[in-house]
Image (spheres, grey):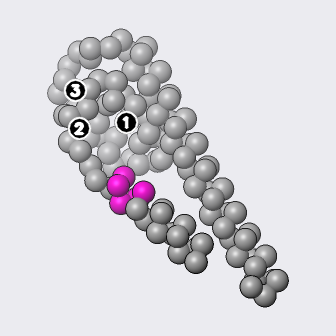
Amino acid sequence: MKRFFLIGSLVAVLAGCAQEKPLSSYDDTGLCTLKGQAMGYGNTDIIPKIQAEFSRRGKLSISQADCDTYVQTGQQDARVKMKTSDSIIQQSNQTMTINAIKGY
């Protein structure tokens, strides 16, 4: 039962992530953060779209140094979330193995 709850929770989270809002709706800070998250998750499909949005906007309302900081923050956020998800899955697998050995 725990396994189904875990899988259901992950599906709900991923379904929420799948809903894309237009890149034009992000402010400059959000767009820089999104670029970092895309890089951290390895989502190479969206990066050209983000670059095109940067080009469309021209000059940003924040400095390039600030944007670079937000990109790094987005990358770190993505890595932490991926490690957390991997850890949850690994813990679930270990629990299922222990329960199978104990005969639950």
Quadrant of the rendered structure where residue 2 is? bottom right
> Residue 34, labelled with which disc?
1
Q: Is residue 65 above or below residue 12?
A: above
Numbered disc 1: secondary structure = helix
Identity, as a three-letter code, of the amino acid under mark 2? Leu
Check disc 3 and give the amino acid type.
Ser
Image coordinates for residue 39, horizontal then vertical, percent: 45, 40
Displayed quadrant of residue 54? top left
Which residue is drawn at the image coordinates 66% and 67% (left, top)?
A: 92
| Residue 45, horizontal then vertical, whole percent | 34, 49
Residue 78 in sight here: yes
Front disc: 3 or 1: 1
Q: Which residue is mark 3?
A: 55
Judging by the rendered image, the residue that carries numbered circle 2 is: 23
Mark 3 or mark 2: whose residue is earlier in sequence = 2
Boundaries of the magenta span: 13-17
Q: Is residue 16 magenta?
A: yes
Vertical order, 29 against 96 (above or below): above
Give yes or no for contact between labels 2 and 1 (Cβ–Cβ under 8 Å).
Answer: yes
Q: Which secondary structure lies at badge 2?
A: helix
> How crowded is the residue under tag 1: few (<14 C-alpha within 10 Å), some, or many (20+)?
many
Callout 3: SS: helix
